[in-house]
Amino acid sequence: MNQRTRKDWILGLAVLLGFLAAWQLAAVLANSPFLPGFTDTLGAFADLVLHGDLEGYSLLTHVAVSLTRIAGGFTLACMMGIPLGLLMGLYPSVYRSARMVIEPIRFIPPIAWIPIVIMVMAGFSRYLFIIWLGAFFPILISTLAGVPRVNPIHLDVARVHGASRGYLIRRVVVPSVLPEIFAGMRVGLGVGWMTIVAAEMLGGENIGLGRLVLKYAELFKLDYSVAGMVLIGLLGLLLNEVFIRAEKRFFRWRWEVTV
Amino acid sequence: MAVGGHRLEIRERQIDLIQVEGVSKRFGNLLVLDHVSFTVRDGEFICICGPTGCGKTTLLKIIAGLIPATAGRVMIDGQPLDPLRNNISFVFQEPSCLPWRTVFGNIRFSLETRSAALGNTMSKAEMDERVDRILDLVGLQDFAHYYPHQISAGMKQRVAIARAFATEPELLLMDEPFGYLDVQTRYYLRKEVLRIWEKLRRTVVFVTHSIEEAVYLPERTMVLTELPARVSAIIPVDLPRPREYADPQFIALRKKITDLIKWW
């Protein structure tokens, strides 16, 4: 570890401790059951880890179930967003003609869909849809924006040797756009993860991290809710970190790695 | 030899490989090429030389079939160019290595593309073997697993040249391949290209704005005029090889071409 990263670490840690202290101080001063302090949250978290929640579900079950839902919605978003993004990037007329539909829908927050989702969907499909909504558009947009940035010289290199259109797409366009696709997937995963509470609000089941937060909020045990929130935040951070590591690995050929 | 594609069995030096017949190119209102006609013999090394921005690159890309001519035609072996029948390669002026592939993978790319276009005519082992051979030829064996961003601009251009040679093209088109390089690398690569050409004896059309190159490399040099480009002269360069830049004959020929090309 060099001098600089060491300094960054120490500074980062100091800011974190300062933040926790300020939080604790605010809670002590407020002395309200609606503002749990850091120690209360830590206690709640320990209780959840050791004894599970009040219905007996372990914390690990909540995490595993939420991750499964995310994986489902995110996979669906990738399966639709990447091919559609490539299609629209390769044939801009498709995007231009679909723009008036796509663009407004893109800006409707997933939460706004909740009433309609409750009406027309049931079970797992509800989670899938809400998470898909969050993840799909970032993947679609960055894929389609990446296609025009393919270096035309790279296409000519293949054309001179008689490459077919399909070959150009598979061997030149896709590898060129892959970093953009990956960046879109990382953002999509983040947004999808952030919709977890909204998605689990309407699942009607008692497990999942979003459900955990809501379950304790209804009982005014906010220290437990905040513990769930912190865990959602930390897991999101972890997922993002895993993605960035993967990007660095896959795209070693890019000397500048997006962070 | 499947990737080699169609070749003439008897490589008579007098056989014309390329016939450029009255090629004109217009971009909007701008006439870039004006009835350009010339022929290139099979196995010949010819330079196309002219002032910067005179349409040399456009002419080369028309020969390669990358852009269409507005009028006239290019015949290869008596027929219009067909990338499936004619085995051609192109070295671009701009950096053209695929950044996601290693040096090895970049050189292999031309073989993979050609093989796929012809219906998988080459086995993976054959390709690897061919790439290894060409890596030796251009002296890049120690860098086979480097990515383009890890090597110098000169080496990248050597990779592009190696990639072009890998398919053993009957026709190699080179568009100011040393334009972006420093002087040392340029001198070195000139020698390299000549060495490879002398070994493989492929037809080379080499575009340059360097008069020195136009005397050092080819058997003939075609000089183009300023825009709209027409053929100003085709000059035989029959100096003995290896050529010396300070040789009086070299200097005399360089002066001759300089006088033809002068726009000041």
Image: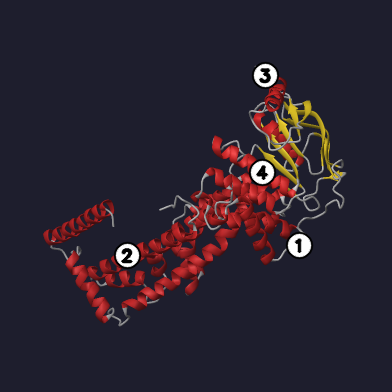
User: For the residue labelled by badge 2, is the local secondary structure a helix, a strand or a loop?
Assistant: helix
Q: Are marks 2 and 4 on the same chain?
A: no
A170 relative to B57, above or below: below
Residue A94 in sight in this render: no
Find disc 1 in the rendering and name its residue: B119
How crowded is the residue under tag 1: few (<14 C-alpha within 10 Å), some, or many (20+)?
A: few
Find disc 3 in the rendering and name its residue: B263
Residue at 11% x, 59% y is: A29
- Type of the residue with mark 1: Gly
Chain for numbered disc 3: B
Residue A145 in sight in this render: yes
Instruction: Give the side of residue B258 with respect to residue A123, left or right.
Output: right
Chain for numbered disc 1: B
Q: Are marks 3 and 2 on the same chain?
A: no
Residue positioned most to the top? B264
Mark 3 in CB contact with mark 2 (< 8 angstroms)? no
Mark 1 vs mark 3: in front? 3
